[in-house]
Amino acid sequence: MPPADVAAVLGSYSTRVLTARGSTAACGLELMSVLRPPTRAVKDAATGSWVSGPSPGSPAEPVDPAPPEAPAERPLVAALSPRHTCGPGHW
């Protein structure tokens, strides 16, 4: 392809593709929200009109992150039982 055509194709590709922004946590939350939005359209039984309602299974509520895996000598890990870790032998 001629350079001008390559530039045009890359230009339209870059305008159509979403690029990551922010931290990986923000990108992950954004991806989960796009795949399963927190709300959906539901029909109101009383009025018959469409209203916004919760979407089952969507990440609507914040949750605490999983604890990081740390070496056994760390005080935090020493207080955990082995079933709370993903160490060797748990696969």
Image (tube, rainbow, N blue to C red):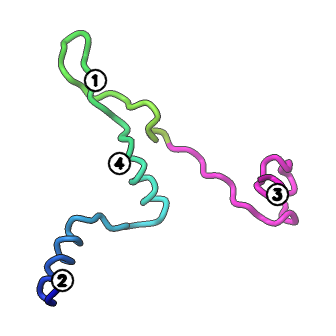
- How busy is the neighbourhood of tag 2: few (under 14 within 10 Å), some, or many (20 plus)? few
Q: In the picture, residue 2 is in which quadrant?
A: bottom left
What's the magenta bit mostly, secondary-structure-wise? Answer: loop
- How busy is the neighbourhood of tag 3: few (under 14 within 10 Å), some, or many (20 plus)? some
Reading the chain from its start, which is encountered first: label 4 or label 2?
Answer: 2
In screen coordinates, is 65 left or right of 43? right
Reading the chain from its start, which is encountered first: label 1 or label 2?
Answer: 2
State the residue position of label 1: 42
Reading the chain from its start, which is encountered first: label 4 or label 1?
Answer: 4
Residue shown at 37%/67% (left/top)? 21
State the residue position of label 4: 34
Reading the chain from its start, which is encountered first: label 3 or label 2?
Answer: 2
The disc label shown at residue 6, or none: 2
| Circle 2 SS class | helix
In screen coordinates, is 62 left or right of 71? left
| Circle 1 SS class | strand
Amino acid type of the residue that numbered disc 1 sits on in the rendered structure: Val
Where 36 falls versus 18 (above or below)? above
Amino acid type of the residue that numbered disc 4 sits on in the rendered structure: Val
Magenta span = 62-91
Estimate the spatial distance between the alpha carbons at disc 4 and disc 2, rounded to whole Å.
30 Å
Estimate the spatial distance between the alpha carbons at disc 4 and disc 1, rounded to whole Å.
18 Å
Estimate the spatial distance between the alpha carbons at disc 1 and disc 2, rounded to whole Å.
45 Å
Relative to the observer, which residue lies in front, 34 or 88? 88
Q: Position of residue 55 (x, y in %)?
A: 38, 32
Of tags 4 and 2, which is closer to the observer? Answer: 2
Reading the chain from its start, which is encountered first: label 3 or label 4?
Answer: 4
Of tags 3 and 4, which is closer to the observer? Answer: 4
Where 23 falls versus 81 (above or below)? below
Estimate the spatial distance between the alpha carbons at disc 3 and disc 2, rounded to whole Å.
54 Å
Amino acid type of the residue that numbered disc 2 sits on in the rendered structure: Val
The disc label shown at residue 77, or none: 3
